[in-house]
Amino acid sequence: MAGMSPILRRKARPPHERLVTLIRKPGCHLCDDAQAVIEKVCGDLGVPWEEKDITQDAQLHDAYWEQIPVVLVDGEQHTFWRVDAGRLRRALTK
């Protein structure tokens, strides 16, 4: 392994060290759909998640208004509009 790239030697982070963030707005049916997927995947894996209301945060509003719902994994944008459960699961277990 000495010659292996450090990127390939990375160990997966434990689930409790991950964080999924759903950026949403009230009354958004796509946001409700995204939340259902996040609740299922994060619940299965023991990954914590949080939601943030885009109408209560000017910085989030400016950054993501046209993309909501937006899903962040560990602070990095993972997806927007629709959440694919398999893709989210892979991102959280790699």
Image (tube, rainbow, N blue to C red):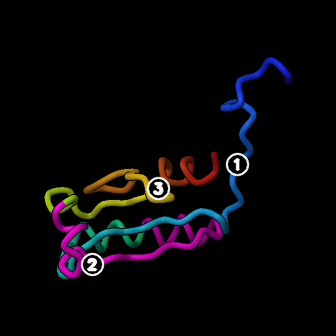
Q: Residue at x 22, y 82 (%)?
A: 56
The span from disc 3 to disc 1 (Cα, nearest Å) is 19 Å
Amino acid type, mark 1: Ala
Start-end of magenta stretch: 37-62
Q: Give the quarter of the image for residue 18.
A: bottom right
Q: Residues within 10 Å of mark 1 (few under 14, many from 20)?
A: few
Q: Is residue 82 magenta?
A: no
Q: Nearer the viewer, residue 67 or 3?
A: 3
Nearer the N terminus, badge 3 or badge 2? Answer: 2
Q: 49 left or right of 24? A: right
Q: Residues within 10 Å of mark 2 (few under 14, many from 20)?
A: some
Residue that label 3 marks? 85
Nearer the N terminus, badge 3 or badge 1? Answer: 1
Q: Residues within 10 Å of mark 3 (few under 14, many from 20)?
A: some
Q: Secondary structure at mark 2?
A: strand
Nearer the N terminus, badge 1 or badge 2? Answer: 1
Horizontal and vertical percent position of residue 84: 41, 52
Q: For the N terminus, give its image quadrant.
A: top right
Residue that label 2 marks? 53
Q: Look at the numbered discs 3 and 2 and tell me whether their residues touch, using CB distance below 8 Å.
A: no
Give above or below for 36 relative to 9: below
Q: Is residue 53 magenta?
A: yes
Q: Main secondary structure of the magenta part?
A: helix
Q: 25 left or right of 39? A: left
Q: Residue at x 18, y 78 (%)?
A: 55
Which residue ends up furthest to the front in the rendered image? 59
Residue that label 1 marks? 12
Amino acid type, mark 2: Asp
